[in-house]
Amino acid sequence: MFGMTKKQFLKKSKNCLNDTGIQLILTREILNKEDNGEISADETYRELDKIRKNMESIFFRFEGRKPPSKCKPMQIEILKTLIILQDALVARSEYLILSKKGLTQEARAEKLKSLQMLESFREKFKNLSHKIDLYLR
């Protein structure tokens, strides 16, 4: 059986990024609600865990793709970007756990780390989306 064509890979990549974009929007919504005191830390933790599990699913589905050899670097770039979002979600969850334990200094450091990772993710995500859109034209 033959592998995917470049165009097929790009379409699958676009779908992966679209699915990830939805998870990012949900993450931002949850974090904003938590920062504004609209939901509890426990609820935030549960919701972030759901998103983290969704991201794992997206990651493993995309990792299993067999792109043409010339597209392999892009697949790796996308996977690395997805890992950044997963790490940001874990860091934010760690922040919630540390806050609950009363370790404010460590919690603050984890929150800052998660925000930096989210910013890094958004930049890389935007660049990847733009690159894939250009290739699909």
Image (cartoon, grey):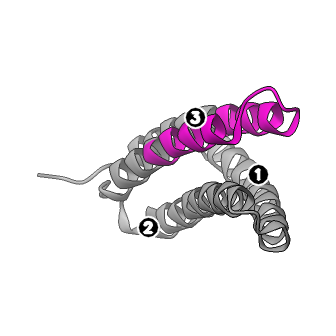
Residue under pointer 3: 18
Q: Is residue 77 magenta?
A: no
Indicate the amino acid at tag 2. Answer: Lys
* Distance (Cα) linking label 1 and label 3: 13 Å
Farthest residue, direction left: 1
Query: Secondary structure under badge 2?
Result: helix
Q: Is residue 27 visible?
A: yes
Quarter location, residue 7: top left
- Residue 99: give its label: none
Residue under pointer 2: 72
Residue under pointer 1: 122
| x, y percent for residue 46 | 54, 39
| x, y percent for residue 123 | 80, 56
Where are the magenta residues, as a range? 24-53
Give the overall secondary structure of the magenta segment. helix
Farthest residue, direction right: 36
* Distance (Cα) linking label 1 and label 2: 22 Å
Q: Are marks 1 and 3 in contact (CB under 8 Å)?
A: no
Q: Residue at x 80, y 26 (%)?
A: 38
Left or right? Give the position of 87 relative to 113.
left
Query: Secondary structure under badge 3?
Result: helix
Q: Quadrant of the C terminus?
A: top right
Indicate the amino acid at tag 3. Answer: Asn
Q: Are marks 3 and 2 in contact (CB under 8 Å)?
A: no
Farthest residue, direction front: 102
